[in-house]
């Protein structure tokens, strides 16, 4: 080997080690596992009964070796719970860890495995409090890992593909399930058992992903991540906000009970355009007068709740949820209540986020 050739090899080795030949280098994706059916297990592959959060992150990664072709991956176990048990402690830990990882130059994207029951709430919460343009992608499954035709492995594979894709950056926190890429502000769970459970009814899909092939249509709707004015710096607890569902013959007892239990805000899952009976509205307005922030959302699957339609929000000091459903309205209101704000400012948040 002559000197010139040896020198050439050395230069190639140095360039490779500094990542200049980035085309050869896989993106790094960190997987944060929280549990859910995607990590669930049943005694047989054809039974409905199962337990969420049985499989650890290492097993989850090992179950989808195909994803190693898309990204260099490492995993961390944040929790291992059914997402019906999701709580503020896990939320604060998860958001902190996402922000830490996203700030690391060698991390290109983050995948979070989660249960489907509350993924829309966790996704929307992260959408408001993580400060990064890097892809943050939640995924889940409707069938446990042991089921015949489990949906988790392909959902996981697709989520890694989206997190590793540069075009996913700057679109807010995303949720990838069953080939669809949803904005965290848009999606809602629409079926208790079907694999095609998530819809983004008003705001539409961000994109699609088929066997790792991504197609992006648009960005997320609503302010998020880098544009968001919310921050968890110094936050150790979130204010209590309760959701009360409206129904025929409703009185104000549950609204008053929520406030008595410590709620600083109440979200009504109203009938129709955020409506409720006269006794319920009287109770709500009385709480609003005392300084409890009261938001009218809707129990209807799609559609906006507008201000001053059948309810005089201006007169009763109420907030209309715009197109946020009750569970997402609750998330936004909890963050809004971290500081003193006027009702006009809170109404602005519901229009902008
Ligand atoms: N109960 C489960 C959960 O949310 C359902 C699922 O993941 O599909 O954790």
Image (spheres, helix red, strand yellow):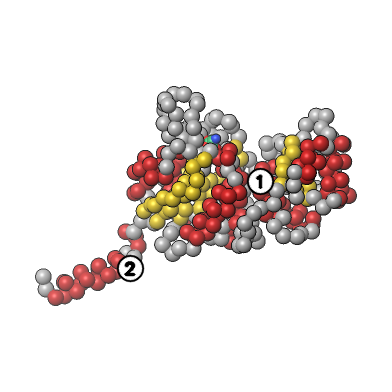
Quadrant in the picture for residue 237:
bottom right
Quadrant location of residue 57?
A: top left
Q: How many marks?
A: 2
Could you tell me residue 127's position as x and y percent? 59, 53
Q: Residue at x 46, y 35 (%)?
A: 40
Q: Is mark 1 within 8 Å of ligand 1?
A: no
User: How far apart, in angstroms, are the residues tagged by discs 1 and 2?
Assistant: 43 Å
Furthest residue in direction left, as rendered: 1
Residue 64 visible (yes or no): no
Q: Answer with left or right where residue 7 lies relative to residue 156.
A: left
**Element under disc 2:** loop
Question: Counting residues from the N terminus, which is met first, the one under dot 1 or under dot 2?
Answer: 2
What mark, if any, has residue 63 been given in the picture? none
Q: Is residue 67 above or below residue 24?
A: above
Name which residue lies at 51% across and 53% down. 136
Q: Say the numbered circle drawn on residue 328.
A: 1
In the image, residue 256 lies at what x, y percent? 81, 41
Quarter of the rendering containing residue 277: top right
Q: Residue, x 62% and y 57% (percent of image)? A: 236
* Residue 18, label in figure: 2
Q: Is mark 2 within 8 Å of ligand 1?
A: no
For image coordinates 57% across by 53% down, the residue present is 92
């Amino acid at each position: 080997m002559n000197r010139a050739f040896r020198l050439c090899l050395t230069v190639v080795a140095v360039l490779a080690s500094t990542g200049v030949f980035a085309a050869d280098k896989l993106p790094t994706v960190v997987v944060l596992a929280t549990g859910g059916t995607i990590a669930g297990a049943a005694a047989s592959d054809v039974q409905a009964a199962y337990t969420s959060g049985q499989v650890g992150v290492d097993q989850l990664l090992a179950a989808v070796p195909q994803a190693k072709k898309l990204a260099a991956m490492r995993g961390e176990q944040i929790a291992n719970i059914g997402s019906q048990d999701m709580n503020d402690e896990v939320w604060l830990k998860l958001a902190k860890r996402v922000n830490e990882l996203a700030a690391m130059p060698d991390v290109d994207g983050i995948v979070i495995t989660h249960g489907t029951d509350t993924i829309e709430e966790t996704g929307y919460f992260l959408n408001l409090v993580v400060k990064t343009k890097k892809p943050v992608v939640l995924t889940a499954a409707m069938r446990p890992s042991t089921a015949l035709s489990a949906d988790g492995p392909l959902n996981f594979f697709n989520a890694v593909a989206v997190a590793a894709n540069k075009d996913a950056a700057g679109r807010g926190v995303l949720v990838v399930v069953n080939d669809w890429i949803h904005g965290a502000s848009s999606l809602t769970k629409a079926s208790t058992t079907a694999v095609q459970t998530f819809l983004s009814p008003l705001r539409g899909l961000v994109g699609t992903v088929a066997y790792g092939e991504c197609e992006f249509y648009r960005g997320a709707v609503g302010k998020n991540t880098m544009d968001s004015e919310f921050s968890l710096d110094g936050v150790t607890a979130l204010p209590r906000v309760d959701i009360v569902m409206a129904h025929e013959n409703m009185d104000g007892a549950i609204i008053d009970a929520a406030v008595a239990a410590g709620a600083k805000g109440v979200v009504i899952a109203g009938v129709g355009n955020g409506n409720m009976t006269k006794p319920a509205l009287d109770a709500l307005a009385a709480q609003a007068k005392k300084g409890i922030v009261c938001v009218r959302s809707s129990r209807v699957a799609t559609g906006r709740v507008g201000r001053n339609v059948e309810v005089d929000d201006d007169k009763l000091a109420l907030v209309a949820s715009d197109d946020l459903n009750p569970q997402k309205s609750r998330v936004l209101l909890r963050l809004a209540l971290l500081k003193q704000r006027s009702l006009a400012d809170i109404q602005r948040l519901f229009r902008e986020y």
